[in-house]
Amino acid sequence: MITYQIEPFLAVYADLLPLIEQHYVEVVPYADKFPVDVDVNFYSVAEQLGNLLLVTAREDRDLVGYCSFFIQSHHQYNASKAVSDAIYVKDDYRHKDVATSLLKFCEAELSTSGIDIMNICFKKQYALPETLGFHLEEYVYSKYIGDN
């Protein structure tokens, strides 16, 4: 049985790192130019300030997925929002509603915490956000310009 829970970043970082590394290889467009280099202090400080939500999916003790959000005030109007940092599910657990359950757990927790808006970012090949009631707000384009 898979369980979903909030866990402290530093307490689960050793479990998270292999999933972060796999996630990176799968989705980062410039992975060949930048190695994985998690700023542990950044996450730790965000969590201490109450600005990080980390939800994990575990089967027994095995970490099979995670979802993280940064919480902030909107800079143009009076609203609080949670912006997705990452959502990842191990390959063997995909298409089994783990990602959906992670997002629903996060949504319930964020709503209960008084967050007004929940933004999630997905790679263009995934359609999950629409199935959960999200709508497209903007496109984000990317171009590597580091070799200039």
Image (cartoon, rainbow, N blue to C red):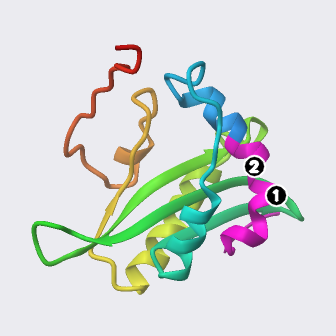
Q: What residue sits 43% from the left and 40% below the top?
A: 122
Q: Are marks 1 and 2 in contact (CB under 8 Å)?
A: yes
- Lateral position of residue 137 relative to residue 27, left or right: left
Q: What residue sits 55% from the left and 81% below the top?
A: 48
For disc 1, the marked residue is 14
Quarter of the C terminus within the rendering: top left
Q: Quadrant of residue 11?
A: bottom right
- Lateral position of residue 134 relative to residue 50, left or right: left
Residue 123, position as x, y percentages in the image: 44, 33
Who is closer to the viewer here, 143 or 66? 143
Q: Amino acid at mark 1?
A: Ala
Q: What residue sits 74% from the left and 54% below the top?
A: 16
Q: Which residues are magenta?
A: 1-20
For disc 2, the marked residue is 17
Asked if the magenta segment contains residue 139, the reply would be: no
Residue 120, position as x, y percentages in the image: 38, 52
Q: Is residue 46 above or below residue 123?
A: below
Quarter of the N terminus within the rendering: bottom right
Residue 128, position as x, y percentages in the image: 45, 43
Q: Quadrant of residue 68?
A: bottom right
Task: Please rate how many residues cluster around mark 2, counting C-alpha atoms within 10 Å: few if below 14, some from 14 to 19, many from 20.
Answer: few
